[in-house]
Amino acid sequence: MRVGVVGATGYVGAELVRWILGHPTFELAAVMRRSGEREPLVDVVPGLAGCTDVVLQPFDAAAVASLDAVFLATPHGTSRGLAEALASVPVLVDCAADHRHDPAWVYGQPELAGERLFGARRVAAPGCFATALELALGPLVAAGVVTGPACVAAATGSTGSGATAGPATHHPERSTNLRAYKVLSHQHAPEVRTFLATLGDAPVLRFVPSSAPVDRGIFATAFVPVGDANPVAIVRDTYASTPLVRLRDGSPELRHVRGTAFADVAVHHDDDTAVVLVALDNLGKGAASQAVQCLNLAMGLDQAAGLLRPGSLP
């Protein structure tokens, strides 16, 4: 299956290329950016040297019209127009936020609603924080055991803000620091609630994100009132047969998911409260590898095809 990536020079786009190059079924047939000259992709993303000789080119809808699928890895607010220009492409997967609330697009949550992706032609991949929160809360909402507001604190790496540094996202400003931002007002919270409402009664969500002194990764801690339910059993049963969610005892660790397509989940229970811990790579399971997972399902492939790669050690 011949696929293309628009926005291949950004963090998510380059990560998409990395996953596609190792995929057993997908062939990387085109890589594009919104503007600029033609040049070898490895001149812009040197880490790919020796793995591909594909040439980066400016966006041209006609040049990818014959492909089987195209990933959109462009900044938020730009993919809607690109999608309209690519209306003839059989399958589009948007990694930006433009279509996550669009009923004409399938929201790409493989573990909790993967059946909706079968045969999908327009897929909106979830945000990175949203993925972590949905994996933490989704099983309990679907089981109908949440009895009150869910409170989540989660930290993200600097790559979550994209390749263009800003005063609050520049890595040297956060390398020895920890700060909260968009307290109770992060843009992924409505996305999470909208998705949870498709599983059951979505609880009030109180979400506090923070900037962590790491370059990639998300670590989320969810506190969920569950009455006398057994949240450990519920979460373990939900993910027992999912290839890209790994259940952990104690605490997940960012270093175990770095550079991988996995999300690691642990559950603890005290009286009437569940504590669900989730670790994932914001560029992997939180973006690029999950987009590939969505396309796998849309194309009728094994959802983990090309994605079962271990992280580096230590």
Image: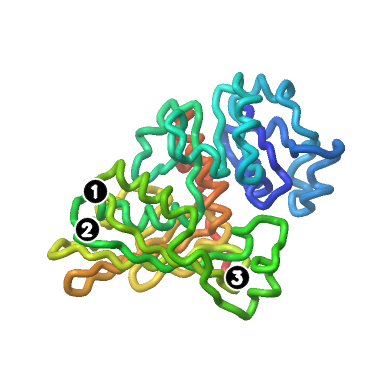
The quarter of the picture where the C terminus appears is bottom right
Q: CA distance from mark 1 to mark 3?
A: 35 Å
Query: To which quarter of the image does residue 51 belong?
Result: top right
**Type of residue at label 1?**
Asp
| Left or right relative to 173: residue 269 | left
Residue drawn at 22 percent across, 58 percent down? 146
Residue drawn at 51 percent across, 72 percent down? 180
Give residue 137's position: percent from left, percent from top: 32, 56
Residue where numbered disc 2 is placed: 146
Please identify, in this view, whether the residue under mark 1 or under mark 3 is nearer the observer.
1
Q: CA distance from mark 2 to mark 3?
A: 32 Å
How many residues crowd around disc 1 within 10 Å: few (fewer than 14), some, or many (20 or more)? some
| Left or right relative to 113: residue 107 | right
| Left or right relative to 260: residue 267 | left
In the displayed structure, 250 sits above or below 36; it is below
Residue drawn at 72 percent across, 32 percent down? 30
**Type of residue at label 3?**
Val
Q: CA distance from mark 1 to mark 2?
A: 8 Å
Give residue 187's position: percent from left, percent from top: 49, 54
> Which circle marks residue 58 in the picture?
none
SS assignment at label 2: loop
Residue where numbered disc 1 is placed: 201
Residue where numbered disc 3 is placed: 214
Look at the numbered discs 1 and 2 and tell me whether their residues touch, using CB distance below 8 Å.
Answer: yes
SS assignment at label 1: loop
| Earlier-in-chain disc, 2 versus 3 | 2
How many residues crowd around disc 2 within 10 Å: few (fewer than 14), some, or many (20 or more)? many
**Type of residue at label 2?**
Val
Q: How is the image coloured?
A: rainbow
| Earlier-in-chain disc, 1 versus 2 | 2
Residue drawn at 58 percent across, 54 percent down? 283
